[in-house]
Amino acid sequence: MVYPSPASRKFVELIQGATSKWANWDPPNKIAVGDYGVVHNETGEFDYEGNIYSPHFLEQLQSSNYKVDFDLSDPTLRPQELPELNDNLIVSSQGVTIKKTDVSSGVGVSGTALKLDMQFHSNKRAAVLVMHKPRYSHLPNDERIIRLLDSIRYILKGKYIVTEVVSCAAYMMYLSGQKAESFSVTLTTTGPVAPAATARGAVGFVWPSQATHGISRQGSDPSAGYVPLYKLKKARSKFQLWLSGHRGDGGFNRWEGAYLSPRPWLGFFSRRAPSPRAAAQKMKERHVTPAPKPPGPLR
């Protein structure tokens, strides 16, 4: 007997198949580089438990047997940002055909910036994720960070760590039903067309007037820092390293990517999602990542 998957899990599964990254079903919910926790296999959603840059984690580290000989406030050990490569990032699964038309009139001009003509095929669910002004940040591939993560396996046992996030100024996500449909979505801009960090205008997605058969979500606020995409990794066991021949490798070759289990209905293989009350309490207990200190001598 096959049980239907929640919409969130289905969307995450389809986007993961297209990018090897995880989709965040609730992009306003912040996910940061260095976060660690578990994934609820029933929903595909990440459950935050801590961050390696948080004060709480540093306290745990200081009380452990591992002696830190470097300072995590060192800028070279902080999350690294990559320059913006494109104005828009479009991710789509199988089962949908997209025709993109860039109709922007140029820098400094308001109006329609992008038009997407989407055609969804029948008898197959499909997913589309569009991000405007994507910004990438990731853990530095520094041997000190790798040594730190390898030394705290007792904290990270059975957990995943966020090694990369993709944030944006506006996003649109759509999970189709099992009916064929075609419609267009446009991205409009009001005010100066600028990177998310400096934009003062507004951006937004305009949906068709006709009804659609799927589930859509969207947000547009250049200052919000939506996080629709992120990457998870998990430390390989010594036995896995021996089998794969990566025992002597450095960097994140010693870590493996995280993927959803193909059997979401097996409760003993998944972790149940927390109740709304428990989730709210966990959000209150989140530790804010401290701002980097000026570089100083390493301890």
Image (spheres, grey):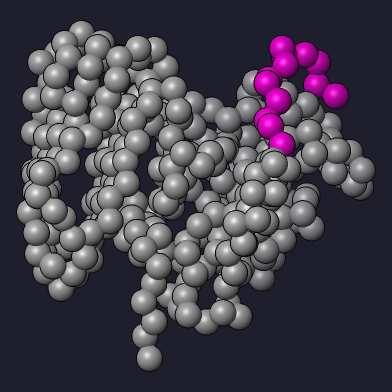
Q: Is residue 281 magenta?
A: no
Q: Position of residue 20 (x, y in %)?
A: 39, 54
Q: Residue at x 69, y 41 (%)?
A: 284
Is residue 292 in view from this perspective? yes
Q: Is residue 106 left or right of residue 237?
A: left
Q: Where is residue 232 in the image (x, y as percent from the top left)?
A: 53, 51
Q: Is residue 60 left or right of residue 166?
A: right
**Camera-side residue: 232 or 222?**
222
Question: Predominant secondary structure in magenta?
Answer: loop
Q: Residue at x 28, y 56 (%)?
A: 215
Q: In this view, does 274 lie above or below 211?
A: below
Q: Residue at x 45, y 28 (%)?
A: 224
Q: Is residue 288 above or below residue 223?
A: below
Q: Position of residue 84 (x, y in %)?
A: 35, 24
**Camera-side residue: 121 or 262?**
121
Is residue 86 in view from this perspective? no
Q: Residue at x 77, y 54 (%)?
A: 155
Give the magenta range: 287-299
